[in-house]
Each structure stands twice: as structure tokens, then as C-alpha cells.
Amino acid sequence: MRDKSLAFRINNIVTDFFTKGHPRTIKAKKNIAFSFVLKTINIATGLLLVPLVLNYLGQTRYGIWLTLASIVTWFNFFDVGLGNGLRNKLSESLARGKNELSRKYVSTTYAVITIISVIFLSVVLILNAFLDWSVLLNTTNVPEDKLNILAFVVFGFFAFRFISKLIGSVLLAYQKPAMNDLINTTGKVLILIIIYVLSNRTKSSLLYVGITYSATPVFAFILFSIILFSKSFKQIAPSVKYVDFSLFKDLFNLGGKFFIIQIAAVILYSSDNFIITQLFSPAEVAPYQIANRYFGIILMGFGILVAPFWSAITEAYTKGEMTWIKNSVKKLVQLWGLAFLALIIMLVLSDEVYHLWIGDKVLIPFELSAAWAFFVGIQTLNTIFVQVINGTGKVKLQMIIGIGGAIINIPLSILLAKYFNMGPTGVIGATIIGQIIALFFIIIQYKKIINEQAYGIWAK
């Protein structure tokens, strides 16, 4: 009887958790629960891929691949912020029940991104014939002609991914981040399967790894796009008939600010591998990124909690429901405290975990692990308040802070890494300094917005 009674109480607690509260909160809880399962699979897959690809390529070639992959991410800003602009504008139009306008936003964004992708791919095709990738990647380990082929393949699929990943912005606008996670997790699991087969059936090949990592996500995005736009999102499916370039200004007014923020984020977060490669060697990228992947588990896990709130906050802010926003942020900050405690435990156990995970092939200094743990702690706290500001669309201050951080990041990274002899730890140290400064101003802006006291730069 006790077992049945306990099971009954647990069932009631779980049922109440997912059925009681504000409808927006209930939707967020369901998305968080589903995303947690998917992100767990995603994280596990990512962790398994590290030793698998490391063993398949070796440390130097693995470092080359990580550096090239990070260079590709520099070009994420080529969507000129339209993905995030679509997310906010679509959320607003859906909240107001304007389905035809919603379809125009979707169709126009797809049209503009397609044009940009064609231009991007054409430029890459021309430039790739003149670039010396062996110099850019600081290596003689791989012949120059093979690096050029690899670069073209990776950038080529990146152009197609540019278009196909827009389905993610649509899902986020509908407050369905879990479905977006499902697409990403499907792609990641397929990559794991393919790399496993390659490692057992073929000799080490950077080209095979590049094709696998580049083509597989595109396949997943296209597959889900076809399914969703033919069923659940049929009423807003992109169509040439609904393309309205006059809406570009509307999308770009907000998206342009996100565009600049994206450029700053690329410099802050995606230039590290390139800096380390140039200052030291591609081999030094491996321990840097392994520490990143380890502590990044918390960043990904916390991302599950905050992901539903951007578009939910857009809806709440549009309707003037400030109390809901305040309560949501308060709960997220409390959860951040638990996340920070988890980071401390992970740091204490880091050496043992590295040994079990990748063996003794790569040495990861404790100071590098400590720096990554601290960075993730600051970044997760920052994410809470950035979600609110992004949801309200008042991102001009964030844009200015991002520009300032981007300007100082590279020289500060070089200064700390090379002239203060901190090595790769100095590179992430520079990013930490930028994040602390940003967090200070972002919290002030959040308080002003939520208390309806934001004026001037704080309200733009």
C-alpha cells in the first residue's frame, strides 16, 4: 500500500508540474522536459565523438579540423541577423493572430537568405582558388590541394545549411525549442554513426570527416522542413507568392542589430581556435576544445532551461505581462546557483574524467580547466538576462557592448597568451574579462526594462 501511495503521490506531483500554472509556463515546462532528454542524447553523442574523431584523425589533424570548423562559423553572420529578426517578428505576428503577415515574414526571409547563400557560395568558389589553407591553418601535415578541396566542401554545405536551418527560427517563434533540439540531435546521432563506420572501414581522412559533419545537418534540416511545412506549419509555409521585399526593412531593423551582435560573438567565441593555431600550433587546439566540450555540458544543459523563454518573453512583453517575466527570471537565477555548484564539482573531478574519457593522449592543464569552468559560470548567468533583452528587442546596448568586446578580445587574447605566458588559458581569459563587463551592463538594463524605467540607450 505504501508503494502504491508513494507512486500515486509522485504521479500527482509530475502531473501537477506539467498541467498547473500559466499556459506559457506549462508550454515552457514541457519543452524543457523534452529538450532535457534530447540534449542528454546530444551531449552524450558529442562526448563520444571527441575520442572517436581524435583516434581517427590523430591530435594534429583533429586540431586542424577544429580550427577549420571554427573558421566556418565566422560566416554565420552572413544571414545579417535575419534568423533572429524572423524569430521575434514571427512571434509578434503570431501573438496578434496575423497569419498572412506571418507567412510573408517566413517567405521573405527564405528568399533573402537564398540570395545571400548563392552570392556567398560564388565568392567562396572564386576565393578558394587563391587561398593557401596550409598557411591559414599553420600546417604541413595535409597537402595544400586536399585542404582546398576540404574547405570548398565544408563551405559549400555551409551555404545550404544557411537556408535549411531557418526552420529552427520558425520553431523557436512557435515556442517549440524541443522540436528544434530534435533536429539537431538527429543530425548529431547520424554523424556519430557515420564516423563510427568510417573509423572501422576506412583510413584516416579529413575529407570524410568534413563531408560527414557538413552534409548530415543539412539533410536533417531539409527533412524536417519538408515534414513540418507540409503539416503543422502549412499555413505559414514559404511561398514565392508571399515574398514581400518591403518587409525586409522591418526584419532588418531588428535583425541588423542581431547581425552586429552575431559578428561580435563570432570574434569573441570562434576566433580562439585560429589564435591558438597561429600562436602555438593546431595540436594545442585539441586540449583547449576538449576542456570546452567538458564544461560546455553545463552550458548546453542550462541552455535547455532558458531556450523556451526568448519567444515566450516576446509574447509576454507584447502583452505587458511583466510579473510573469520577473518570476521566470527569479527561478532561472536560482537554478543558475545549482549549475555553478555543478561546475565546481566538475572541476574537482576533471583530471579523472579526462582520463576515463580520452585516456592519456592529450594533456589538459588544470588552470585551463579552471578558466573554462569560470567562463561557463559567467556565460550561463549572462544568458538569463540576454534572453529577456533579446525577447524585448531592446538590443542596441548589447550591440555596443558586443562591438567593444570584439575590438579588445583578439589583442587581449594575444597579450595574455603570449606576452604574459599564459598560453591557451590566456585566450579564454580574455573572453572572461569581456563577459564580466557585459554582464554588469546587461543586468542594469534588465532591471530598468522590467521596472519600466528604461529610457535612452537602455530602451533601444
Image (tube, rainbow, N blue to C red):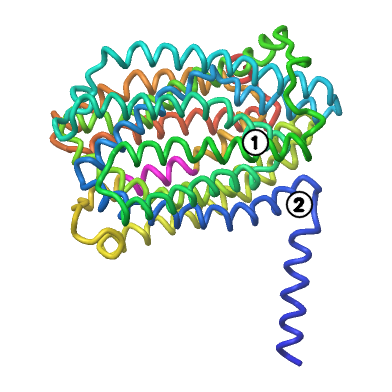
Locate residue 321: give its quadrant: top right
Magenta run includes residue 167: no
Who's the residue at 58% across and 30% down the image?
Answer: 164
What secondary structure prevails in the magenta region? helix
Q: Quadrant of residue 279?
A: top left
- Position of 137 with respect to 454 (left or right) is left
> On the picture, is 197 further left or further right than 169?
left
Q: Nearer the viewer, residue 69 or 302?
A: 69
- In front here: 326 or 267? 267
Label 1 sits on what residue type? Trp
Q: Which residues are magenta?
A: 372-380
Q: Secondary structure at mark 2?
A: helix
The amino acid on which the numbered mark 2 sits, given as a three-letter code, is Ile
How many numbered marks have been drawn onto this rendered protein structure?
2
Left or right, 316 with reference to 36 = right
Which one is earlier in the sequence, the residue at label 2 or at label 1? Answer: 2
**Pointer 1 local density, CA inside 10 Å: few below 14, some 14–19, many at least 20:** many
Q: Residues within 10 Å of mark 2 (few under 14, many from 20)?
A: some
Which image quadrant for residue 263? top left
> Quick check: 335 above or below 407?
below
- List x then y, in percent, for residue 12: 78, 71
Q: Which mark is residue 310?
A: 1
Residue placed under numbered mark 2 in the picture: 26
- Does residue 336 appear left or right of residue 59 in this picture? right
Quadrant that contains the C terminus? top right
Tell me the SS state at disc 1: helix
The answer to which of 75 and 347 lies nearer the viewer is: 75
Give residue 360's position: percent from left, percent from top.
19, 59
Pinpoint residue 364: horizontal percent, then vertical percent: 22, 51
User: Which quarter of the figure is the N terminus placed in?
Assistant: bottom right
